[in-house]
Image (tube, grey):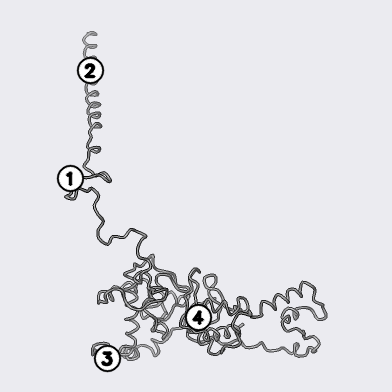
C-alpha cells in the first residue's frame, strides 16, 4: 500500500512539473516575439519605397510656421504699422465675423465695459476700477488697431487678453466694437433705409425711468473715483488762513521762499541747523524746474486740464492719484522729474512698464506744455 501511494504522488508531481514547464515555455515564447521591434516604420534621413519620391520624411504643408516663429511684427498680429496703431481690418468683414465678435465681447468685455460699451459693467458697479467708455469722442476716432493693441497688451488697469482670446477673435471683437459705436450714431442711410430709433425713444416706449440710459453713478468705494471720468478735476484752492496765522508778526516770515515749507515747520525763534539748511537746499533744488525742460508756467492751465481729462485721466485718474502700484500718481510729478521727462514720456510712451504706457503722437509740444502747466499748478 505504501509503495502504491508513493507512485501516485510521484505521478502527480510529474504532471504538475509538466504543466509548470509548459506555462513557462509559453511565456518565454511570447517574450521572444519581434512584432514591436520589426514594426513598419521610417528611420530619419533614410529612403523608402513606400512613397513615389523615395523620401521617408514628408515635406511640410505649404504655409507651415513653427511654433514661436510667427510673423510677430505683422499688422495682423500686432495692430501696429511702423510702431503706430493702424486702421483697417486685416480680415474679411462678414456678418459671421461681427456675430463672433459680439459673442466674444459679451464673454470677455461686458463685465467691465457693459453690453452697451458705456464702461459701467457689473463689476465696475461693485467697486472695481472704472472702465473706459467706448462711446467717447476719443475712442470713436481711435483707429481699429488701437482696440486690438489694447486687448493684446493691456491698457491702464485693464490686463491683456492675448492668453484668453485668439488673434482672430481679437479682430472680431474690434470689428464689433466699431459696429457698437456706429450703432449709437447711425443714420437711416447707414441702416439701409431701416427705421432708426434713438435710445431715448426706446426708453420712453419701454416705460423705463427717465435718464435710465444716462451715465450711472458708481457706488461709494474707498479709493475709487466717484465722479464721471469725463468731468474735469477741480483745481485745488489755497488753504484759508487761520486767525492765528494772520495775527503773526511779519518778522516770522522766512526771507527765502524756496526754504519756506521747511523753515516754517521750525519753532518760533529756533535757528535752522546745518541738517535743516541742507534739507531746505535739497527741497529747493528738487522743486526748481530743469534748465533743459520747457517752462511749466508757459502753458495754459485751463487747456491743460481739458487735455489731461481727455488723454490721461482714464489711467492716472481725474485726481492725478493714479492706481498704485500699477499706475503711478502724478501729484507733484513736475517737481520730481521735470517737464522734459514728461515730454519724453508722452512722445515715446513707456512700453517696458507694467502695464505699458502708450505714446501720444496726437499731442503737440504746446499741448504737453499745457498739461505740464496743469500738473504743476495741481499740487
| Total number of numbered discs in the rendering | 4
Q: Residue at x 37, y 60 (%)?
A: 68
Residue 49, label in figure:
1
Q: Residue at x 33, y 78 (%)?
A: 88
Task: Evaluate if marks 4 and 1 touch, with contact meaning CB atoms under 8 Å apart.
Answer: no
Q: Residue at x 32, y 85 (%)?
A: 183
Q: Nearer the viewer, residue 196 or 305?
A: 305
Residue bearing the label numbered 4: 312
Answer above or below: position of 357 versus 29: below
Residue bearing the label numbered 2: 14
Task: Evaluate if marks 2 and 3 touch, with contact meaning CB atoms under 8 Å apart.
Answer: no
Task: Evaluate if marks 3 and 4 touch, with contact meaning CB atoms under 8 Å apart.
Answer: no
**Residues at marks 2 and 1, CA–CA distance in whole angstroms:** 54 Å
**Residues at marks 2 and 4, CA–CA distance in whole angstroms:** 97 Å
Element marked by disc 4: loop
Give whichever of discs 2 and 3 has the lower sequence position.
Answer: 2
Give whichever of discs 4 and 1 has the lower sequence position.
Answer: 1
Residue 80 coordinates in the image, percent (x, y) = 39, 73
Residue bearing the label numbered 3: 188
Amino acid at each position: 500500500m505504501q509503495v502504491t501511494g508513493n507512485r501516485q504522488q510521484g505521478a502527480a508531481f510529474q504532471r504538475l512539473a509538466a504543466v509548470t514547464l509548459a506555462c513557462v515555455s509559453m511565456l518565454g515564447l511570447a517574450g521572444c516575439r519581434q512584432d514591436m521591434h520589426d514594426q513598419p516604420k521610417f528611420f530619419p534621413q533614410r529612403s523608402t519605397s513606400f512613397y513615389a519620391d523615395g523620401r521617408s520624411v514628408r515635406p511640410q504643408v505649404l504655409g507651415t510656421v513653427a511654433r514661436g516663429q510667427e510673423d510677430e511684427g505683422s499688422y495682423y498680429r500686432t495692430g501696429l504699422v511702423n510702431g503706430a496703431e493702424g486702421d483697417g481690418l486685416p480680415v474679411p468683414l462678414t456678418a459671421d465675423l461681427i456675430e463672433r465678435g459680439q459673442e466674444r465681447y459679451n464673454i470677455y468685455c461686458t463685465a467691465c465695459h457693459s453690453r452697451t460699451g458705456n464702461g459701467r459693467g457689473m463689476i465696475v458697479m461693485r467697486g472695481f476700477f472704472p472702465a473706459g467708455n467706448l462711446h467717447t469722442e476719443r475712442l470713436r476716432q481711435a483707429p481699429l488697431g488701437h482696440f486690438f493693441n489694447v486687448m493684446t497688451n493691456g491698457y491702464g488697469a485693464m490686463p491683456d487678453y492675448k492668453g484668453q482670446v485668439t488673434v482672430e477673435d481679437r479682430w472680431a471683437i474690434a470689428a464689433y466694437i466699431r459696429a457698437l459705436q456706429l450703432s449709437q450714431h447711425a443714420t437711416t442711410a447707414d441702416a439701409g433705409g431701416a427705421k432708426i430709433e434713438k435710445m431715448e425713444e426706446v426708453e420712453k416706449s419701454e416705460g423705463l425711468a427717465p435718464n435710465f440710459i444716462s451715465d450711472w453713478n458708481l457706488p461709494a468705494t474707498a479709493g475709487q473715483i466717484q465722479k464721471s471720468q469725463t468731468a474735469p478735476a477741480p483745481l485745488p484752492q489755497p488753504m484759508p488762513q487761520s486767525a492765528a496765522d494772520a495775527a503773526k508778526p511779519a518778522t516770522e516770515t522766512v526771507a527765502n521762499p524756496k526754504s519756506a515749507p521747511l523753515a516754517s515747520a521750525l519753532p518760533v525763534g529756533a535757528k535752522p541747523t546745518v541738517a535743516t539748511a541742507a534739507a531746505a537746499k535739497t527741497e529747493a533744488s528738487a522743486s526748481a524746474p530743469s534748465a533743459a525742460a520747457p517752462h511749466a508756467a508757459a502753458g495754459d492751465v485751463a487747456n491743460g486740464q481739458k487735455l489731461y481729462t481727455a488723454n490721461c485721466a482714464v489711467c492716472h485718474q481725474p485726481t492725478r492719484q493714479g492706481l498704485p502700484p500699477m499706475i503711478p500718481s502724478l501729484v507733484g510729478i513736475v517737481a520730481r522729474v521735470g517737464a522734459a521727462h514728461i515730454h519724453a514720456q508722452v512722445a515715446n510712451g513707456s512700453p517696458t512698464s507694467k502695464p505699458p504706457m502708450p505714446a501720444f503722437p496726437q499731442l503737440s509740444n504746446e499741448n504737453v506744455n499745457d498739461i505740464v502747466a496743469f500738473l504743476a499748478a495741481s499740487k
